[in-house]
Structure formats: structure tokens, C-alpha cells
Image (cartoon, rainbow, N blue to C red):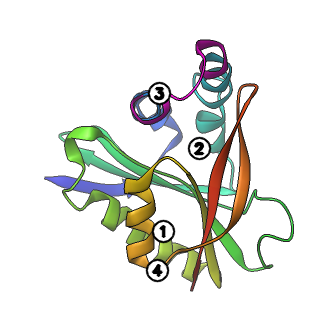
């Protein structure tokens, strides 16, 4: 049975390990070992962004668990995209990750429902996200919900710059 709950700071190590594994599976082939290493050092680990953001009020996390293990999560944030990309009441879905063995089981849909409901409850009138241009599965998922491509974002993975699509959903 899949259960959902808000993340707590003590979830950090398990969440970090799950997120790193999913990131490597999806993006690990897309750059040099050096650039991937630089990105992983910034994003993950005890001093990485993910664990630091667990205690930052600008970010909210919702976890999906099965048998006590974290199998997915959504991270809702204050917008971090460049100014002019969003209005004053926007929120941003920073990450939505689901472990490989649990994709297609409705986990992403449930996490997205939480994200939209939480953003609305916080007074948001739009939800933004970025998605890698070479991730068509994720793009299709977001498009089915109603997100539309409104711009591009230069995503730094180490020294490499990738193109992410900025997508927007009016709330």
C-alpha cells in the first residue's frame, strides 16, 4: 500500500538517496562524468540542496512511501525562475520524482494533485515547472494535466548548460 505524508527533516538521508538514484537513472547519461559529479555534489549529500531545503520554509515536500521506503516525492517552492517568467502569486513545482518500480501506479498523479491543491491553498494563481527537453515522458504527463510550454530555461549541470522547458498551469 502506498501512503502519502509531508516530509520531515529526519527523512533527509532516505529522500536524498532516492532522489539521487532517480536523477542518475534519468539524467546520468546526459553529461560528462565531471559535470555530473559537480551537479551531484551541489544537489545531493549531507550539505546538498535537497537536504537543506527540507528545513527551508520556501519549500514544501510531500512523500510517497511503500513499506516504509520513500518511492516518490513532490517539492513545491517559491519560484526560482528568472524574474519576468511568473507573476506575484506563482508557485513552482521544483521536483516530482517517482522510483522506477512505482511508475504507472498513480504516484505521480497523487503527488501532482497535492501540489496543485497546496499551491491553490497558498493563494497561487499559477504553477510553474521546468522539464528537460529530452524527457518526453515527463512532458506528456505535464501536458495531460494542462501545463503549456511558455519559455526556456538554461539549466546548469556542472559546466554544461542544458535546455529545460518552462511550463505553466493557470490555477
Name the residue: 59% across, 24% down.
Answer: 31
The residue carrying mark 1 is 115
Name the residue: 52% across, 74% down.
Answer: 118
Taking the image as shown, residue 35 lies to the left or right of residue 113, namely: right
* Label whose residue precedes the other's in the sequence (1 or 3): 3
Measured in 3D between alpha carbons, the distance from the residue under mark 3 to the one under mark 2, in whole angstroms, is 11 Å
**Where is 117 relative to 138, above or below?**
below
Rendered-image quadrant of the C terminus: bottom right
Reply yes or no: does residue 80 show up in magenta: no
The residue carrying mark 3 is 13
The residue carrying mark 2 is 54
Q: Label 2: few (<14), some or many (≥20) within 10 Å?
A: many
**Where is 132 relative to 114, above or below?**
above
Res 73 visible? yes
Name the residue: 40% across, 28% down.
Answer: 21
Give the foreground label among 2 and 4: 4
Q: Give the residues in magenta.
A: 25-36
* Label whose residue precedes the other's in the sequence (4 or 3): 3
Give the quarter of the image for residue 88.
Answer: bottom right
Measured in 3D between alpha carbons, the distance from the residue under mark 2 to the one under mark 4, in whole angstroms, is 28 Å
Measured in 3D between alpha carbons, the distance from the residue under mark 1 to the one under mark 4, in whole angstroms, is 14 Å
Q: Which residue is situated farthest in the top direction here? A: 34
Amino acid at each position: 500500500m502506498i501512503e502519502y505524508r509531508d516530509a520531515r527533516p529526519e527523512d533527509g538521508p532516505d529522500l536524498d538517496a532516492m532522489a539521487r538514484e532517480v536523477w542518475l537513472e534519468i539524467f546520468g547519461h546526459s553529461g560528462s562524468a565531471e559535470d555530473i559529479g559537480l551537479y551531484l555534489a551541489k544537489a545531493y549529500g549531507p550539505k546538498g540542496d535537497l537536504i537543506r531545503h527540507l528545513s527551508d520554509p520556501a519549500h514544501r515536500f510531500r512523500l510517497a512511501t511503500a513499506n516504509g521506503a520513500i518511492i516518490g516525492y513532490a517539492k513545491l517552492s517559491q519560484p526560482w525562475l528568472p524574474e519576468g517568467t511568473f507573476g506575484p502569486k506563482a508557485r513552482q513545482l521544483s521536483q516530482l520524482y517517482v522510483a522506477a518500480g512505482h511508475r504507472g501506479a498513480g504516484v505521480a498523479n497523487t503527488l501532482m494533485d497535492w501540489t496543485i491543491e497546496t499551491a491553490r491553498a497558498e493563494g497561487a494563481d499559477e504553477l510553474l515547472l521546468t522539464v528537460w527537453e529530452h524527457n518526453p515522458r515527463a512532458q506528456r504527463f505535464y501536458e495531460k494535466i494542462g501545463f503549456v510550454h511558455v519559455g526556456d530555461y538554461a539549466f546548469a549541470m556542472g559546466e554544461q548548460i542544458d535546455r529545460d522547458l518552462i511550463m505553466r498551469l493557470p490555477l
